[in-house]
Amino acid sequence: LALRVLMEAGIVGAFAYWGYQAGAGTGMKILLAVGAPAAGFGFWGAVDFHQAGRLAEPLRLLQELAISGLAAAALYAAGQHLLGWVLGLVSVIYHALVYLQGGRLLKHP
């Protein structure tokens, strides 16, 4: 659970940092620092994979890896190369541990 919290906090921070660095002018910096994490987590929660049957778990894994990968790439692109690599590594370790321990990303409703 702690690794999941660390990963999700890292994703929010990565998108916010990238947004702030990418913005031109204070207003745009703030808008992107708030909007980029909101868009990332909006995409995360927008799809109900339970309807996908056997493909639900693999699709959820792909979605989570894509979002965490984009966040890691955003950090890297914003000049935080080491933190980008660390976030990517934390995501891979977390997801590997979930499956190695017999867990699932999706809980059955």
Image (cartoon, helix red, strand yellow):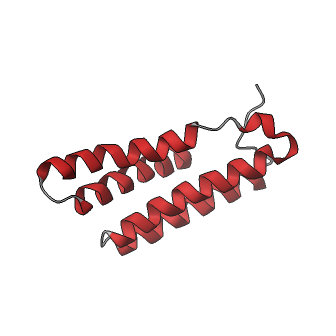
The answer to whether 22 is drawn above or below residue 15 in the figure is below
Residue lying at 52% horizontally and 65% vertically, measured from the top left: 88
Which quadrant would residue 74 be assigned to in this image?
Answer: bottom left
Q: Is residue 25 left or right of residue 80?
A: left
Can residue 22 be seen in the rendering of this structure?
A: yes
Q: Is residue 71 left or right of residue 18?
A: right
The answer to whether 49 is drawn above or below residue 70 in the figure is above
Q: Toward the viewer: 88 or 39? A: 39
Residue furthest out toward the right: 54
Q: Position of residue 39 (x, y in %)?
A: 43, 44
Residue furthest out toward the top: 109
Can residue 1 be seen in the rendering of this structure?
A: no
Q: Position of residue 49 (x, y in %)?
A: 73, 39
Residue lying at 70% horizontally and 43% vertically, measured from the top left: 105
The answer to whether 108 is drawn above or below residue 42 in the figure is above
The answer to whether 19 is drawn above or below residue 2 in the figure is below
Residue furthest out toward the left: 26
Residue lying at 58% horizontally and 37% vertically, measured from the top left: 46
Q: Toward the viewer: 41 or 92? A: 41
Q: Position of residue 109 (x, y in %)?
A: 76, 25
Question: Quarter of the image containing the N terminus?
Answer: top right
